[in-house]
Amino acid sequence: MHPLLGVSGLNKVYEGSGRRVEAVRDLTFTVDAGELVCLVGPSGCGKTTLLKCMGGLLTPTAGEVHLSGRKVTGPPPGMAFVFQEYGRSLFPWMRVADNVELPLKQKNLPKSRRRELVADALESVDLSDAASAYPWQLSGGMQQRVAIARALAYEPEVLLMDEPFAAVDAQTRADLEDLVRRLWRERGITILFVTHDIDEAVYLGERVIVLSASPTVVQEQLKVDLPDERDQIHTRVTPRFAELRTHVYEQIQAAKRGVVREAPVTKSDTPPLH
Ligand SMILES: Nc1ncnc2c1ncn2[C@@H]1O[C@H](COP(=O)(O)OP(=O)(O)OP(=O)(O)O)[C@@H](O)[C@H]1O
């Protein structure tokens, strides 16, 4: 079976204004259909660059991205994004429902189907009653839920999320994390979630891919063997959660010092239970 998403030998060099930055050196990993994978790495390690290459928004200098066996050369129809800056990703002059509906207009769906998808997505993020509000009338967390609804309504195969909760307060963030896990379980979407927050990566992911400092390679892949049912109060205080987060933390520290593990990439590479 082919993985749904494949990144092979990805390299990205930015050149211009007398500056040459090798943001991503050599990245190879795959994501299976229905997985929820978190990518975590030090600040500036090229996470956004990687997601933009995966989403066909940037052309890699070398290497390839495949979605369902097809090479990505531009934004693929089966992918949706949620970015960190919800304030900039929603149109302030459009009502919530219109913001959610906008990308669907490219899909040539009848108006009635579009309305159905919008209503369903807003209900999923618990915002049905905000359909006719403007984004600026909502809190930051609510605006990010609108951005999530817009991505859901599009019915993507893959959802790419780039530090989507970095700008909201801690309590809202916890709620949004639980929302992502719930939507993932209910809808069976494949999710690639980028974060620099180690706890968030371990709490959310079924697998964590640790990236090195720039120029970036995969430092390690770690299977998160926490129970499927997770909750903010109990999961985060389990000994296993602490072990996993410590392990990822150590890997990131090693990555910052430039120590790459000798056998970095195995899916079953989970620190032993103590
Ligand atoms: N358009 C660009 N032109 C030149 N250099 C760039 C460009 N975009 C990113 N870079 C450089 O590439 C490197 C990786 O940047 P990127 O934004 O991908 O990292 P990141 O891991 O997402 O960062 P953060 O965690 O701080 O959001 C940085 O050194 C950055 O300065």
Image: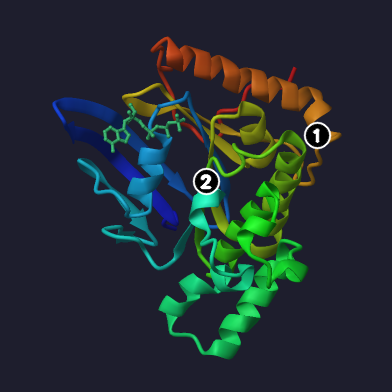
Image coordinates of residue 244 in percent, x first then y, are: 67, 24
Question: Residue at image x 39%, y 62%?
Answer: 68
Image vertical order of residue 82 relative to residue 42, above or below: below
Question: Residue at image x 66%, y 23%?
Answer: 245
Residue 122 seen in the figure: yes
Image vertical order of residue 212 relative to residue 46, above or below: above
Kind of residue at disc 1: Thr
Q: Quarter of the image containing the N terminus? A: bottom left
How far apart in space, not on screen, are marks 1 and 2 (Cα)? Answer: 28 Å
Image coordinates of residue 83 in percent, x first then y, are: 51, 48
Question: Residue at image x 79%, y 46%?
Answer: 229
Furthest toward the right, the residue is: 234
Helix, strand or loop under label 2? loop
Question: Which residue occupies the foreground of this view, 26 or 95?
Answer: 95
Residue 57 - label = none
Kind of residue at disc 2: Glu
Disc 1 under 8 Å from ligand 1? The reply is no
Question: Which residue occupies the foreground of this view, 110 or 137?
Answer: 137
Question: Which residue occupies the foreground of this view, 248 or 87?
Answer: 87
Residue 235 - label = 1
Mark 1 or 2: in front is 2
Disc 2 under 8 Å from ligand 1? The reply is no
Q: Quarter of the image containing the C terminus? A: top right
Helix, strand or loop under label 1? helix
Image coordinates of residue 54 in percent, x first then y, are: 37, 49
Furthest toward the top, the residue is: 257
| Circle 2 residue | 85
Furthest toward the left, the residue is: 18
Report the image quarter containing ligand 1.
top left
Confirm or deny contact between disc 1 and disc 2 (CB under 8 A). Answer: no
Question: Residue at image x 36%, y 63%?
Answer: 76
Image quadrant of residue 45? Answer: top left
